[in-house]
Image: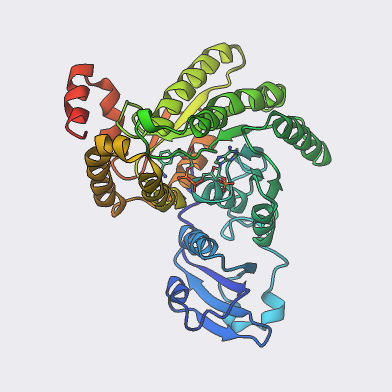
Amino acid sequence: MTDPAHSGPILVEIRIGAWLEYSPAAKWFPGMSLRRRKNGETILRGSMPDQAALFGAFRRLQDLAIPLRSVTILPPAAGDVPRAACRRPEFQGDPSMNASNAIPNPPPSGESVLITGCSSGIGLATALYLAAHGVHVLAAVRKEPDAERLRGFRLAGLEPLCPLDMTQPAQIASAATAVKESLARRGREGLYAVVNNAGGGFISPLELMDLGRFRAEMETRVFGPVALLQELLPLVRRARGGRILWTATAGIVAIPNVASIHDCEFAMYGVAQTLHLELSPWNIPSIFIGCGGIRTAAVDRTEAELEVAMREWPREKLDLYARSLRKFQGQLHGFDAHRTEPEQVARTVYAALAAAKPKRKYLVGFQARPMSLLPLLPQSVLDGIFKRRV
Ligand SMILES: NC(=O)c1ccc[n+]([C@@H]2O[C@H](COP(=O)([O-])OP(=O)(O)OC[C@H]3O[C@@H](n4cnc5c(N)ncnc54)[C@H](OP(=O)(O)O)[C@@H]3O)[C@@H](O)[C@H]2O)c1
């Protein structure tokens, strides 16, 4: 397969709804010219190393809530021609793919793919990456401002689907209807893939666990995806090569303090494996995107939430777990420094979608490979490793 990620440098003009001149964000666009406009916008113009770098910068802008107004991909020789002549109406896929060098419409290019949890992190990076490579992406988010931000990217194939909260059966049913309508508008019958990505998770020992949040996580990662797939599988069956993807931790084992993530993944894993078998008559595989440490908003969020929780938990209970939690925080800090950018996950998802014979599991991100070996160890060895963490 040709890897479209290696598209090389691209010349772009980016319009941002803020003055970047003195902002630290300017350093994400090294070597680009920067023009401040009276209406409060900044126009950046120049070359980015590749699409992954471009999307990485977009994601960081989003993290800082700096609005992205438009992106225009310019032909490589744009410096020599008048700007108006080289402007394309909007960002419509891989700029290196033109009529002469494009691989002839390989899957998933031109196919429709639904991704849940596209407001940030892995979901957002994947939605942008796939849409830039010609995929019709139904990018599900919970909140309208997130849908609006997705529209702001002006990617032709990027279609926000909102609201889709995976804990809300009514929203799941409406979203499924919206997917069917969208496909019908495009004259399509099949949905090529569903990427089950939405998920939160938080740090807490089970004895102190907020059960409402734990239940919501189970809904988000287990029951919600089942409900969604009950609605959408007829469409996936109609697609040639249809498949279901699940983003999860590279090696699912019990780890103290992260039951809300790993225990939900145990359940999700079971569901995915069962589906794989049940859907085998139609050759619809369940594929794991096994993630190591990925740098997303979830990292800071879970740590900040833990600090708040530690102030709110009853003192006598907290005292029982404070040592283990502090140890855990220390380990997280060491780990966080090495996390991989979510664009790498996006490329891996693309590979899983493009493969004619996809693997059951793809690994991506910091320490994904060693993590993936953990479930192979005897339970007594795992107990030994993780008891030392409490
Ligand atoms: N980051 C890692 O190192 C890592 C490693 C292994 C697995 N994963 C998994 O990868 C997935 C994405 O994580 P991330 O790191 O990209 O985190 P993130 O940036 O926090 O993104 C999580 C996404 O899920 C959405 N979401 C959460 N609860 C939802 C619900 N009930 N219904 C619908 N959407 C919901 C969030 O939407 P809102 O913005 O509306 O909250 C957000 O769009 C998660 O399932 C996570 O467990 C991540």
- Identify the residue at image location x=78%, y=40%: 182
Vertical arrangement, residue 31 with respect to residue 161, above or below: below
Q: In which quarter of the image is residue 262?
A: top left
Pick the front one: 189 or 26: 26
Give x and y (percent) for residue 288. Answer: 45, 30
The answer to whether residue 89 of the structure is visible from this angle is: yes
The answer to whether residue 190 of the structure is visible from this angle is: no
- Identify the residue at image location x=70%, y=64%: 90
Pick the front one: 101 or 184: 184
Using residue 236 as the reference point, say whether residue 218 is left or right of it. Answer: left
Q: In which quarter of the image is residue 326?
A: top left
Give x and y (percent) for residue 78. Answer: 60, 77
Tally of numbered tags? 0
Pick the front one: 106 or 359: 359
Using residue 311 as the reference point, say whether residue 230 is left or right of it. Answer: right
Using residue 275 as the reference point, say whether residue 342 is left or right of it. Answer: left
Pick the front one: 97 or 48: 48
> Which quadrant of the rendered structure holds the C terminus?
top left
Vertical arrangement, residue 295 with respect to residue 186, above or below: below
Vertical arrangement, residue 128 with respect to residue 283, above or below: below
Give x and y (percent) for residue 336. Answer: 31, 51
Q: Which colour scheme is used?
A: rainbow
Give x and y (percent) for residue 272. Answer: 51, 21
